[in-house]
Image (tube, rainbow, N blue to C red):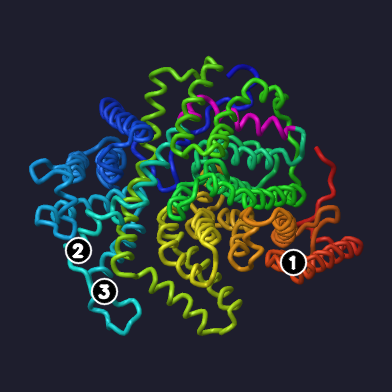
Amino acid sequence: MGDSRSLVTEHPPAVHYDDEERPARELTGRVALGVAAVAFLVALLVLWEVFRPLAQGSQFYLIIFLAGTLPLVFLSYHPGFGSKDRPTILDWSLAVLALIVCLYPLNPFNGGYDGFLNRQGLLETDDIVAGAILLLLVVEACRRTTGWALPIVCAAFLAYGYYGGLLPQNWPIAHVGLDFGQIVDALFNSGSGFYGTPLDVAATYIVLFTIYGAVLDISGASRFFVDLSVAAFRKSRSAAGRTAVAAGFLLGTVSGSGTATAVSVGAVTWPMLKRAGYPPEQAGGMLAAAGVGAILSPPTLGAAAFIVAEYLDVSYLTVLGWAMIPTVLYYLGILLAVEIDVRRFNVKALDVPQTSARRLLLRFGYHFSSLILIVVLLALGISATRAVVYATVFAAALSFLDRRNWLTPRRLFQALSAGVRGVLPVAAVCAAAGIITATTTKTGLGAQLASLLVSGARAVTDNPTAVLALTVVLAAIALAILGLAVPVTASFIIGWVIIGPALLGLGVSPAAAAMFVFYYSVLSEVTPPTALAAVGASAITGGRTVPTMWQALKYALPAFLAPIAFVLTGPGEYLLARGPFLGIVWTTLAAMLAVFGLAVATGGWIFGIGPAPLAARILGGLAGLLLLYLAPTTIAAGVIALAVAAGLAYLHKRTGSHETAQSYDGPTS
């Protein structure tokens, strides 16, 4: 990219994949070309559907989309045994079988697509056999891309649908029972199964954004974002940490993936963090938290955000608006933690190439243009699908401003095929999620479990506020546990059908309930003991995995508590930018002060004073909780608690009883 872009000598790892994904095969030769060609054709179909939707309707399109993507999963992801370098006979056989059963509803010898729809509820034996095979293939594709957890959850829901009629009928979760044909019909020939909302979102929104991310990546945006982050903070003692956080935020607009962003940013910034004096676990936690911010940050939120928009029937721009203030709070918490760590770990300033951030912006700042264009087009009322296509075309055109990154026909082919390959694991997860949504719809399980959740809270107390608070805590715990087992997208879908009704039944608004479920689903990426983003970051830094997870949790703490404020109090919804302007302002300021209190509690440092003793840290944490309740009395109590914490830290400093492990008095390097 020229001399002005010499801060990063190597291109960051490819980022056009999602957190739903396990490592794919590195295909070569004719197999790689064939997979890329099919993925390219699927990309053309996706783009065609945006401007010329197929006359037969969205389910017809989803059938063809799944027929194009499901076979590629078996060729691109190894089963865990046999050859990991190239597809085996088994893989080819499953790919061909997947193509056949996916296209079965279009079989012209059995009435075609219209005949298949007319048999809804009255499937013939051939239909049931084809649907059963597709069920097995979807579960196997999900296992290959995500591991065993989600297939086991799907099997549990299937078992409940089939054997639920054997449960004692006085049990709340008992139902009349479904036979195998009814289950297959719900999955194969209804709007809530394989071809339900999750796959619809993957095939219409998510795939377009992965294509957009691939185009940005190939056009040099990823490298520019990292270079800009390095140049912007080169003179500060906090430069290394700030660079990692800023690069995570910017690179997340390309990847929309927590783990991918953490790994990509870590590959570039870990050498800087190491030279600055960060321990591996601390640096890994910072990278993981910064990476997960990619899924929380506009304008390209994670896949589940599109499902939020679809479920609530609102525009994607509306969801972006809801995410703005929580994103600010999240990164404020990370940056405060970075500044505290600079002081605690004797972090040094670094000598980096003296490339001007202004020079980079003037020469390569056009990479921001397509991101801005998306927001502008959404504000003008253009659909999210068309907005991202226009932005993709614009980004492709802008690539010709840098000769080294021209989007030639070959590179365009690579970008489109990479975008579709990037959505393969998400498509598998979304198709498998149809098993869960169809089962809950047919059996009424979602409403029953929601009722049990609320009943459990009411068994403890009759106070409405206490019932809501206890339900929220139980819901947060349930979502955190659920996120340990299944990917973010599936976690949101399951959480919404089970926990969403419970919150809605207690008077929580749909927007607040959906964003609560969304944030806790995303935060599974930094929740021990799985924490995929932390695992990826620890692989880069060489740090111990579990301590890295706990450090990531420390950095991301505000994101765990802010969603509770959404649903626990009326003013909490102002944090979603829903309400009067002054209300939004004062709740945001109170929440920012709460984040400061939480930073004191986790970091053990008060700016302008120094190390915080244990009592001050406890008061800081208490202040954060009180401030986030967003009631006048609790805000006043929180401010007082923070003031007392500062006073204790000041007295601690004056007495000279600094804790050696936390003190720092040295000069800057």
- In this image, 196 relative to 402: left or right? left
Q: Which amino acid, by three-letter code, is at mark 1?
A: Ala
Q: Is 215 left or right of 639, judged from the image as shown?
A: left
Q: Residue 424: x, y in percent?
A: 35, 42
Q: Earlier in the sequence, mark 3 or mark 2?
A: 3
Q: Quadrant of residue 576?
A: bottom right
Disc 1 element: helix
The answer to whether the residues at label 3 and label 2 have Cβ atoms under 8 Å apart is no
Marks 2 and 1, how far apart in space?
54 Å
Residue 457 visible (yes or no):
yes
CB under 8 Å between discs 2 and 1? no
Residue marked by disc 3: 164
Q: Nearest to the eye among marks 3 and 1: give it.
A: 3
Tell me the number on the disc at residue 203: none
For disc 1, the marked residue is 623
Q: Earlier in the sequence, mark 2 or mark 1?
A: 2
Give coordinates of residue 462: x percent, y percent.
56, 84
Q: Is tag 3's residue or tag 1's residue first in the polypeptide sequence?
A: 3
Q: Which residues are magenta?
A: 215-234
Secondary structure under the numbered disc 2 in the rendered image? helix
Of residues 433 and 76, the one nearer the viewer is 433
Residue at the spot of label 2: 182
Left or right, 29 with reference to 293: left
Residue 358 pos. (x, y %)? 72, 25
How many marks overall? Answer: 3
Determine if the magenta segment contains residue 226: yes
Residue positioned 60% across, 32% down in the render: 225
